[in-house]
Image: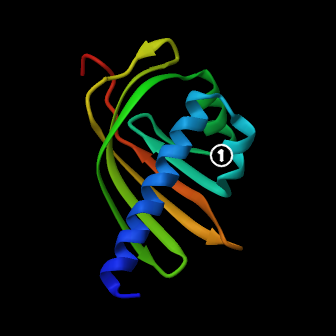
Amino acid sequence: MDKQTDQGNIALEAEALERLSVKLIQDKNWDALEKMLDPAWQFVSMNGACDRASTMSLMKQMNLGPVKFKDFKATQAGDNLIVSFWLAALEFCDGKELSPNYSPRLSVWKKVTNQWLCIAYADLIAKSGN
């Protein structure tokens, strides 16, 4: 397989992981989502950083509506997959509407026994009105 084909497969796999993660949040399928998160998971947003348990608590309070994605970029470094993309969604967190405009996202995945586990996620969405 040539390098261009490998990169194409990596990009498709990365996009599929991100779309699945969002679908699991929309469906409130918390068990399946937690299985995709590494125990050392870290989440960072404009409100700061938090661990896996805190992140799950935040996500369970979120009501995630329709989502649009664009501009996926993926690179692989050994067993790590780095994915950046833009996401637009109608989101409510802590009863507050977040900006429905596209905002950048970044995730880092690690392959553990043939399964990708997300180890870090940056959500750079701004609160609506900022």
Circle 1 — which element? helix
The quadrant in which the C terminus is found is top left
Residue lying furthest top in this view? 95
Q: Which image quarter: residue 29?
A: top right
Give percent across and percent down for residue 47.
Answer: 43, 34
Give percent across and percent down for residue 63.
Answer: 53, 20
In screen coordinates, is 105 left or right of 120? left
The quadrant in which the N terminus is found is bottom left
Pointer 1: what residue? 52
Q: Is residue 29 above or below residue 32?
A: above
Identified at 34% across, 55% down, the residue is: 84
Which scheme is used to colour this image of the protein?
rainbow
Q: Amino acid at mark 1?
A: Arg
**Nearer to us in this view, 49 or 84:** 84
**Nearer to us in this view, 57 or 26:** 26
In screen coordinates, is 35 left or right of 85? right
